[in-house]
Image (cartoon, helix red, strand yellow):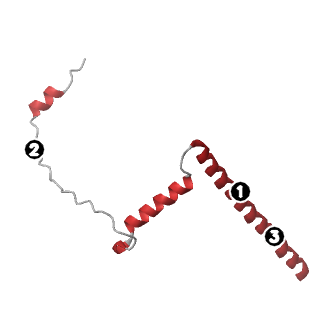
């Protein structure tokens, strides 16, 4: 009985290994195809673009500026003064109904 259990474990382990290796091959093919397709069109490969965006995001979100210093946007905040519009002005702005 233990021999059959050992054979099943070996079989399913090999089956899982074949599945993982197959998925890795498919992903590698897709990566290479995407890179070649980007180069044929004259664009930067998507993997490079995504990696660069990730690094830029990580630099901006890094605590205490450990990945480098970025310029801070010191924009002034201006409060808006609200005023009430009289009812007469609102009535003139409406279109007449037919």
C-alpha separation, residue under disc 2 versus residue under disc 3: 75 Å
- N-terminal-most mark, 2 or 3: 3
Residue in the foreground of this view, choosing between 19 and 55: 55
Task: Tell me residue 64's x, y (percent).
Answer: 34, 74
50 lies left or right of 98 = right
85 lies left or right of 18 = left
Residue in the foreground of this view, choosing between 45 and 91: 45
User: Which residue does the image show at 54% across and 46% down from the upper left?
Assistant: 43
Image quadrant occupied by the N terminus: bottom right
Residue 1 in view here: no
Q: Label 2: few (<14), some or many (≥20) within 10 Å?
A: few
Q: Is residue 73 above or below residue 37?
A: below
Q: Is residue 11 above or below residue 56?
A: below
Image quadrant occupied by the C terminus: top left
- Where residue 7 sits, quadrant-wise, is bottom right
Instruction: Report which residue position mark 1 lands on.
Output: 26
Task: Tell me residue 3's x, y (percent).
Answer: 90, 80
**Residue at disc 1, secondary structure:** helix
Query: What number is the disc on residue 14?
Result: 3
Instruction: Report which residue position mark 2 lands on.
Output: 83
- N-terminal-most mark, 3 or 1: 3
Q: Does the CB distance between marks 3 and 1 fall below 8 Å?
A: no
């Amino acid at each position: 009985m233990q021999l059959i259990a050992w054979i099943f474990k070996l079989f399913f382990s090999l089956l899982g290994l074949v599945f993982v290796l197959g998925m890795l091959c498919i992903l590698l093919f897709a990566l290479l195809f995407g890179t070649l397709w980007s180069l044929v069109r004259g664009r930067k490969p998507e993997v490079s673009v995504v990696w660069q965006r990730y690094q830029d995001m990580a630099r901006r979100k890094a605590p205490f500026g450990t990945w480098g210093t970025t310029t801070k946007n010191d924009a002034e905040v201006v409060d808006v003064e609200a005023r009430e519009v009289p009812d007469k002005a609102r009535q003139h702005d409406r279109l007449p109904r037919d």
